[in-house]
Image: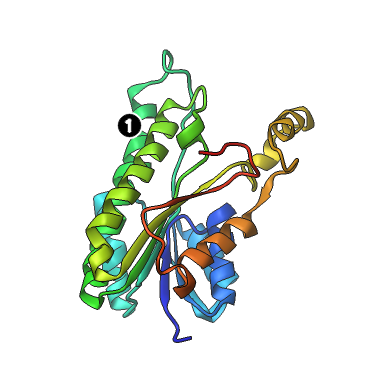
Amino acid sequence: MQEQTVLITGASRGIGLEIAQFLRNLDYRVIGTSTNSGGVKLIDQALGPGGKGIEMRIDNDESVAQAFSKLEELEESPCILINNAGMTADNLIMRMSSEEWSSVIDTNVNGLYRVTKPLVRQMMKNRWGRIVNISSVVARMGSPGQTNYVASKSAIEGFTKSLALELASRNITVNALAPGFIETDMTSVLDDDQKEKIMEKIPLGRMGQAKEVAAAVAFLISDDAAYITGQTLQINGGLYNS
């Protein structure tokens, strides 16, 4: 296939890095973002000549604008967007500070808007594009101590449905993926007892692999998924179905 350029936010580790490497192995041109120079270097090393890391803080208008200016300088024109970057700041609502609430909403929801809008213009001009937003199983099932995070992920799914309707006439699909418990550096800090309790809730009896999420992304941006839009694909081992 002709090489297409993908922009992946939050690509320096975990699921984002796995998606970046998976798509690069499928001969996509991959641009990955990180919040710092160290992450950019890691992306460059992981992807080799077929990829590129750039700095971008999706919670900051100026940083996003500078990143897109950098893309123009590099003559990179992504036609596929994977909105993966996000954050957590867990706390019970009675103890949650306004900063903990606002930082998660600004990053996970407003960041989605900041990155998506400028790319949509180019996709509409080309009359083709693919957008995949990374949600979470908790968007549907809830999670105590994560009202801010759950609210942000629920918003992502609503955003996905509405944007899909706006862009369908231009041959642009918009979908979401909602991973459950996936083996990454974030879940590696759990002790054996915590992991055992999690496994008891998952019908398949194991955590998912980041590669399984990446494979689902690859499907949704492929021509085989051209008739799928406005959907959220659950990847959770049967933990929650809706």
Residue ranking furthest to the bottom:
2
Q: Is residue 68 left or right of residue 84?
A: left
Determine the secondary structure under disc 1: helix
Say left or right for 49 vs 95: right
- Residue drawn where x is 56% and y is 77% of the image: 26
* Residue 72 locus on image (x, y percent): 27, 75
Foreground residue among 68 and 123: 123
Quadrant position of residue 110: top left
Q: How is the image coloured?
A: rainbow
The residue labelled by disc 1 is 102
Name which residue type carries label 1. Answer: Ser
The answer to which of 103 and 159 lies nearer the viewer is: 159
Q: Is residue 107 visible?
A: no
- Residue 201, visible in the rendered structure: yes
Where is residue 200, by image quadrant? Answer: top right
Query: Vertical placement of 20 versus 157: above or below?
Result: below
Question: Observer-nearest residue: 81 or 71?
Answer: 81
Image x and y of residue 89, in percent = 46, 31
Asked if residue 95 lies left or right of residue 167, the reply is right
Residue 4 higher or lower than 171, as above or below: below
Q: How many marks overall?
A: 1
Please name the residue shown 50% across and 35% down the image: 138
Q: Residue furthest top?
A: 94
Q: Is residue 167 above or below residue 70?
A: above
Q: Residue 226: x, y in percent?
A: 41, 69
Residue 205 image point, x, y percent: 75, 40
The local crowd at label 1, few if under 14, some if 14 to 19, many if 20 or more residues have their Cα within 10 Å, is few
> Residue sitting at 32 percent across and 75 percent down?
77
